[in-house]
Image (tube, helix red, strand yellow):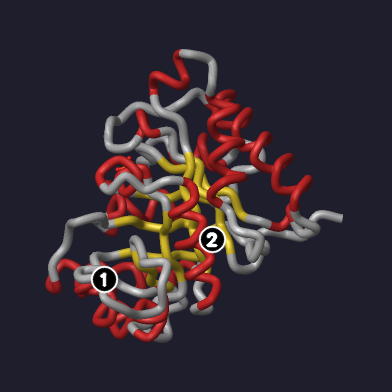
Amino acid sequence: MTQARKPLIAGNWKMNGSGAMAEAEARALAARVAAERPAAELALCPPATLLARLAGWLAGSGISVGGQDCHAKASGAHTGDIAAEMLWEAGALYVIVGHSERRADHGESDATVRAKAAAGHRAGLISIVCIGETLAQRDAGETLKVVAGQLRGSLPDTATATNSVIAYEPVWAIGTGRTPTLEQVAEVHALIRQELRARFDDGAGFRILYGGSVKPDNAKALMAVAEVDGALVGGASLKAADFWPIVAAKG
Ligand code: PGA
């Protein structure tokens, strides 16, 4: 029998936010969660400089915080990088790895992403592993091949349904206001589920998020697609007024 998967709605603030904004959003979301008790779990992934303070403001609210990236090593001479253990110490429960902006801006390969995901596991974090095709790859009919390859290459053998979440984010849908059709989302999520089941004993239990231009007006339809266990939300996670309808859309 398939284990019930608790939906997850995760906000990725990217390089946005300030202390004042983070405190206001934390308080607004904590109040909504207390009042409305949503079915979905919530997580916010702010810039690293805000992580510890955000974790403090959210303490006891049930809302988790996460990092947006980590280094594969636990410590060492890596100027500007942050270890997964440091994120954990700052109060994180999650870490996003392999976001397409990291892959594109910092040349991260599947092997790099796999090492970072494993670092998250080593530190006791839940790694949110991002995969997704470019528009050129979709137009060339390569979506399923690309996504399956990224999944195999980016997910370490240490992955379990408890310590890993998959985020399917078509690169061309991120920050563009464009989304795949519901059929396209269903097709890719079904493939990811099939791959997870084939590789892991608990493959049926992994949560698979959709990400890319999830907004209040399309969230309900996207979240109702089979095998979509929640969302990774960029722009719309920056304001509680936009983020909350997405949370509410998943139950
Ligand atoms: P977006 O970003 O919701 O702004 O498209 C999604 C993401 O990059 O995770």
Mark 1 vs mark 2, foreground winner is 1
Q: Which residue is mark 2?
A: 40
For the question of whether residue 218 can be seen, the reply is yes
Q: Quick check: marks 1 and 2 in contact, CB under 8 Å?
A: no
Q: Position of residue 182 (x, y in %)?
A: 54, 27
Residue at disc 2, secondary structure: loop
User: In the displayed structure, would residue 102 be above or below residue 157?
Assistant: above
- In the picture, the disc for residue 107 is none
User: In the displayed structure, would residue 54 be above or below residue 21?
Assistant: below
User: In the displayed structure, would residue 27 be above or below residue 245?
Assistant: below
Q: Amino acid at mark 1?
A: His
Q: Which residue is mark 1?
A: 78
Q: Position of residue 80 (x, y in %)?
A: 20, 69
Q: Position of residue 123 (x, y in %)?
A: 49, 78
| Mark before the other along the chain sequence, 1 or 2 | 2
Q: Amino acid at mark 2?
A: Ala
Quarter of the image with the N terminus is: bottom right
In the image, what residue occupies the spot 44% across and 54% down?
112
Ligand 1's image quarter is top left
- Mark 1 burial class by Cα count in 10 Å: few <14, some 14-19, many 20+: few
Q: Position of residue 22 (x, y in %)?
A: 21, 70
For the residue pair 103 and 231, the one nearer the viewer reads as 103
In the image, what residue occupies the spot 76% across and 59% down?
202
Residue behind label 1 places its C-beta within 8 angstroms of ligand 1: no
- Mark 2 burial class by Cα count in 10 Å: few <14, some 14-19, many 20+: many
In the image, what residue occupies the spot 48% across and 46% down?
110
Q: How far apart are labels 1 and 2 at the CA level? A: 36 Å
In the image, what residue occupies the spot 54% across and 40% down?
150
For the residue pair 156 and 173, the one nearer the viewer reads as 156
For the question of whether residue 249 can be seen, the reply is no
